[in-house]
Amino acid sequence: MRKNPFFLYFRDFLFLIGLLIALVITITLTSSAGSEQATLVSLLHLDAIEWLRRIWTIVGLTISIMTNYLLFM
C-alpha cells in the first residue's frame, strides 16, 4: 500500500521546521553565552588578566562549534 505523497512531504516539512527551531535555539544560546563571558570576567574582577579573555574566547568558540556539529550529526 502506497502512502500519499502529500503526507510524506508534510512530514518532511515538519522535520525541517523542527531543525530550524533547534538551530535558532542553538544560535541563541551560543550568542548569549558569548556575550555574557565578558560580563562574567568583569564581575569576578579578572579584567587585568589578558590571557584569561583569550582562553574564554577559545573555549566559547569551541563549545559553539561542537554544539553546531552535534546539532547536524
Image: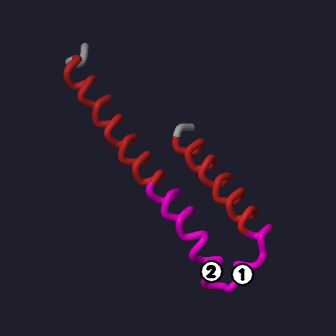
**What is the secondary structure assignment of the residue under circle 2?**
helix
Q: Residue at x 47, y 51 (%)?
A: 27
Residue 31, numbered circle: none
Residue 57 falls left or right of residue 64: right
Q: Which residue is mark 1?
A: 46
* Vertical placement of residue 33 versus 10, above or below: below
Most foreground residue, 44 or 4:
44
For label 1, the crowd category at 10 Å Cα-Cα, with few meaning under 14, some 14 to 19 and many 20 or more, is few
Location of residue 48 (image quadrant): bottom right
Q: Residue at x 60, y 77 (%)?
A: 40
Q: Quadrant of the N terminus?
A: top left
Q: Position of residue 14 (x, y in %)?
A: 29, 36
Q: Position of residue 15 (x, y in %)?
A: 34, 36
Q: Main secondary structure of the magenta part?
A: helix
Q: Which residues are magenta?
A: 28-52
**What is the secondary structure assignment of the residue under circle 1?**
loop
Q: Which residue is mark 2?
A: 42
* Vertical placement of residue 5 versus 47, above or below: above
User: Is residue 51 on the magenta stretch?
Assistant: yes
Q: Residue furthest top?
A: 2
User: Is residue 11 on the magenta stretch?
Assistant: no
CB of mark 1 within 8 Å of CB of mark 2?
A: yes
Q: Position of residue 61 (x, y in %)?
A: 65, 53
Q: Amino acid at mark 2?
A: Ser
Residue 63 falls left or right of residue 31: right
Q: Residue at x 53, y 65 (%)?
A: 35
Q: Residue at x 52, y 44 (%)?
A: 71
